[in-house]
Each structure stands twice: as C-alpha cells, then as structure tokens.
Image (tube, helix red, strand yellow):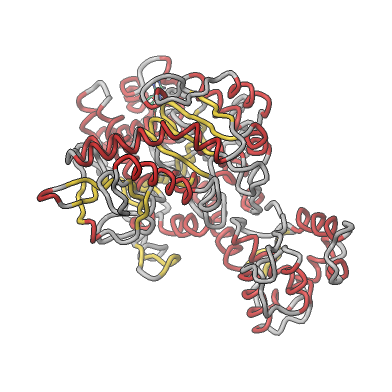
Amino acid sequence: MSLTPFEPTGPRDCRLALHAEGVLRSFNEAGWIEAADVHVAARVAGLVAETDDRAVVALALTVRAAREGSACLDPSTVLPVLAASSSEDNAPDHQFADLLPTDVDDWLATIRSSALAAAEVLQVEHDLIYLDRYHREEVQVADTLRARGELPDLPVDDAVLEAGLARVFAGDSWHEQREAVRAAAGRRTTVLVGGPGTGKTSTVAGLLTLLVEQAEATGRRRPTIALAAPTGKAAARLQESVAESVAGFADPADRERVGPLDAVTVHRLLGWRPGSSTRFRRDRANPLPHDVIVVDEASMLSLTLTARLLDAVRPGARLVLVGDPDQLASVEAGAVLADLVAGYQDPAPHQPPPAAPPNHSPVVRLRTSHRFGQRIGALAAAVRDGQEERVVELLRSAGTDDGDEGLDGGQDVAFVEVDSPGAAEKALRGHLLGHASRLRELALREDAEGALRELSAHRLLCAHRDGPWGVSSWNDRVHRWLAETTGYHGRQYAGRPLLVTANDHRLGLYNGDTGVVVLGDEGRLVAVFGDPTDPARYGIGSIGDAETAHAMTIHKSQGSQARHVTVLLPDADSRLLTRELLYTAITRAQHHVTVVGSEESVRAAVTHRTARASGLRHRL
Ligand SMILES: Nc1ncnc2c1ncn2[C@@H]1O[C@H](COP(=O)(O)OP(=O)(O)OP(=O)(O)O)[C@@H](O)[C@H]1O
C-alpha cells in the first residue's frame, strides 16, 4: 500500500467527516483517512467499546487499505510515512504527532491487547494488521492450496501424453507449451502465467484436449470441464479463443475431443445469489461437479472471490488459474495472482527460468510472445520491467501517428507527446472522429457485423473517469465533434458505442461488455453486442445500466483487446498513474498502440508500482 494523504479542497470536501471526533478527526483532517473510513472505524470501535486511540487509528487505516485494494495494513511501511509527515514544517496543527504510535512493535502490541482484537475485528499476524474477514480468506486460500499440493498427483499415462504433445504442439516453437502441459497434466492446481500472446490459451486448449485423450486411452470417464473468467467479456473471449485454438489442431480427432464449451463468469459458475457478493450456491458442502476448472484473467480475481472459488473446487478436480500477474489487480482487495507468483518464488519474466523449479510450486510460466509486432512487445516488456530510459527511447523512436493511418496500418507504436488536454484534442481529433464517423455510417446502414468489427478496431483508454484527461470529458468531446459533423445532437443515436456498467443476468449482459447502437427493423434503434458474425440484439429500452463508450477506463478494458489502442496519460502527479496501469493499457492493443501524454507522465507511470499489502506470499 502506498500511503499518500489527500488534500482537502475546502471545508466541504466530501472526504471530510463533519462529525468525526478525537483521533479520527485529526487523521481525517490530515488527509490520511476518508469519511468512509472514519464512519466504519467510529461505529465498530463504539460497538466493542475500544478506548485505545492507537487501535482505533489502526482500524481506520486498515479499512482504508482494504478500500484501496490491500488485504491488510503493513505498519512497517505505513508508520515511517506518517512519522515523516508529522515532522514536516507544515504538519497539521492538531497534535497529530502525539497521536502516532511510537514504533511498529509497540503499535502491534497495543493492537494485540485491544478490545478490537478481543472482539476479533482486527487480527495481527506476520506483523500485519488485518480486518478479520480478509485474514480468514487469506488463511483459507493458503491452506487450501497447501492441502491440494500435498495430495498425490492425478494419474497420467506418460506415453499417451507424449504422443499427444507431439501432435498438438508439433515443432520447435511450441516447446514452452509442451513443457507447460507436461507440468500441468497430473497436477491438481496449476497457475499458468505469461504476458500477452505467450500462448496461454493455446496451452489450455492443448491441456484440455490431452486430458480428454487420457480418459479415452485409459477407459476412464470423460472429464467434465468448466471455463470461467472474472468478467463476462473475458469469459466470452476465453470461449472464443479456446475454440479457435482447438480448430487449429492438425489432427481431426484432436479438433473434436473437447467438444463445444461455454465459458461463464466466476460468479455464475459458483452460483451467484442476488443481493450477496460473497455467498454462493457452490461451496465445500456443495462443490462444483467439474473435473477440470479453468479460470482465465486470474489477475482480476479478488481475495474474496479466490477464497470462494477454492472452497468450491473438489480436492480431486484440476484447477487451472491462467493470467498475467503484471497487469492491474482486482478492483477489490487482493492481488492473488501476483502473490502466488511471488509466494512460490517464480522468477520475473526478464530473469532466467529456474534450473529446477521448487517441486511444490504450481506456477508454470510462458515467456515467449508470439503475437505482438516487435516494437509493441518490446515496449510492453520495458514497462513491465520498469526500464524507464528504454521506454522513453522506444517511444521517442516511434512515429507520431497523428493521422488516421494507425487504424489500418502504419506504426505499431506511436507517441503523441503533449502536455495539455487541449494539445491532445488537436492531435487526436481526426483519428477519433474518423472512427466514430465510420461507426455511425455502418450503424445507419444497419450493418451490425460491420459496426461491431469497427468497434473493436479502436479503443480510447483513460486512467481516470473524471477530469480533463478522464473518460467523461473525452466522451463529451467525441460526441460533440460527431454532432457538429452530423447535425444530430441527441444522446441516443446510431453509432453510439455502449459500455455495460452492471451485470444483467437476465439479458446475459455483463459489466464491461461493449456494444453499439445500430438502426434495426422499421427504423428502430437496437443495441448489438457480442460476436460480430452472430450479434445479440436488444431493444434500446431493455438495456439498463450502460454508458457511452467513445472512451473507457483502463480498468474497464481489462480482459478485452482492440486492434488499435490509444492511451491517454494523465498528469504526472496522478495517483492512478502506475506501471501496472500503463502495462495493462499497452497490452490491450493487438496491432497498434498510441501513447498520448508528456514524457514526465510516461516516466511517472513506469516508476510507480502499485503496492498492495498482503500476507499471502508469506503463507505459501
Ligand atoms: N508456441 C507458439 N508458436 C507459434 N505460435 C504460437 C505459439 N503460442 C501461441 N501462438 C500463437 O500466438 C497467438 C496467441 O496465442 P494465445 O491466444 O494462445 O496466447 P495468450 O497468451 O492466451 O494470449 P492473450 O491471453 O494475451 O490473448 C495465437 O495466434 C497462437 O496460435
């Protein structure tokens, strides 16, 4: 957790808790905790009659940490930051320094003997401070993984496997996939990691096919398979790419083995119950019936969802978690995939693979990218590895791409160096309006397939929702340019790109799904989503929560890709600007990426890492 205070914009700043008292008031006014943290801490401390201010502060800071994605509070990183700020000349004048714990051990001892700990609201372990819920979940995840790892491997006929590998992954270029399937075939748990285009999905397709073949060869029942991902969009993509990989196998029998597979969201797989985000129909007492469970985009799994998933997987089932640990983590608490990779001590992608991986480790890493053009892959790798100078050099040697060519050809990496939203607007207008106009033309021609293809041709990504570099203002800009060109000023129009913002299980539309409004029968507007060759159509009125998507946040774009991605970087002091954010944005691009912003912002992104406190890596 990187602790920075907010600066109240004035006495009416909504982050200030007007009725806060005592120590919570001081920490709130100093910007270390927000109103939401104050309310939770005050209420819970009141319920358990906590009288020690240092325990109350720990509770509020731990609530803040969870809100920002950490599973716990690490006092050894937080206390020095608080202490340094209290000694600054401009430190707030409210005995802030007097309220600080003196040292980490003292603070931890205070919490251990507090009423909050006695009531099991706070837990202290490995010198980390947890809210009880996240502590329980972290222990459960580690215990379940350890218990699964201690069971003997599942039976595999090596001769059949080797013959199968030689068929589905023939040739030198597929040696990493052969190795990965060899490692995963008998394991109950596999964590398959790799950057974009490293052949993760191909590995999954090969593994599933060869597991079915194993059952055929040994007379066992065919394994039942579940494919899932944290979002509907990612699930749809997984289904599509597994089917594509299977269709590419040379042997017709291999193309038939797994049969058609439907991918679903993890929530749906576990039997989501309306009104509860943490309780599911599937759990230890009523586990998933499947023999093989594959979860893609596992970097987006929160600690809570991972705990529920592991709870629902039978010990005898194979679980395969697939993802890229360098991407942005879940919006909720936990960075489970990155923790697993760190906890099992898998070397970073730019380091040589271990000569002999620890045999208890379920982590299998694919290292070679097979998709990107050279420059886009090199840029993604340099960002991922924090090579600031190399990133700047790669961008500087790229073109400027201020025309429209980037959409159909031209540079695979472009850098539009601007230091103000006005300059960005000037540089990007032609580009963005061209794409929006093409969408509109196709939509007016009732060409749903063409409009959906155009939609995935380009995506404008922002770090923020609001502000001059944010999604709202760029949506407004493109809308205004389009209105100026077409003369149509309404908010609902043919060619309007849509982003679904809440799951609608009834319609089969999920948070993050993108579609477009097109002209349908009898001149009515309809919204189309999904596979361009077989689009799902919805009456405009039936779509509940959706917004215009000329631009979207990088967070929302996770799990999806576009041929050309334009990334707008905010000012260098933005708290959201991190290495993981820039890496995630760049790796959404299949063929072209245009980075728009200042060199200072690029450098800030590459040097700032998202720090999420967690004890999971110590427990594995
Ligand atoms: N070892 C390989 N040799 C040659 N081509 C490969 C190899 N592995 C993958 N590919 C090709 O690279 C492309 C990307 O592969 P795949 O979709 O399996 O990667 P991925 O890691 O799942 O990608 P992402 O998750 O980023 O979409 C596919 O066209 C695939 O056929």
**Quadrant containing ligand 1:** top left
Q: Is residue 570 left or right of residue 521?
A: right
Quarter assignment of residue 40: bottom right
- Kindly tell me whether residue 200 is visible in this rendering: no
In x, y percent, where is residue 573? 68, 45
Vertical side of 494 occupied by 96: above or below: below
In this rendering, the count of numbered labels is 0
Vertical side of 100 occupied by 605: above or below: above
* Residue located at (47% from left, 51% from top): 472
- Kindly tell me whether residue 396 is visible in this rendering: yes
Q: Is residue 432 left or right of residue 439?
A: right
Q: Nearer the viewer, residue 215 or 260?
A: 260
Vertical side of 32 occupied by 574: above or below: above
* Residue located at (25% from left, 28% from top): 247
Quarter assignment of residue 597: top right
Vertical side of 549 occupied by 161: above or below: above
Q: Is residue 566 left or right of residue 572?
A: left
In x, y percent, where is residue 322? 45, 40
Quarter assignment of residue 592: top left
In x, y percent, where is residue 69? 59, 56
* Residue located at (67% from left, 67% from top): 123
Q: Nearer the viewer, residue 397 or 535?
A: 397
In x, y percent, where is residue 574? 64, 47
Specify the farthest residue to the left. 522
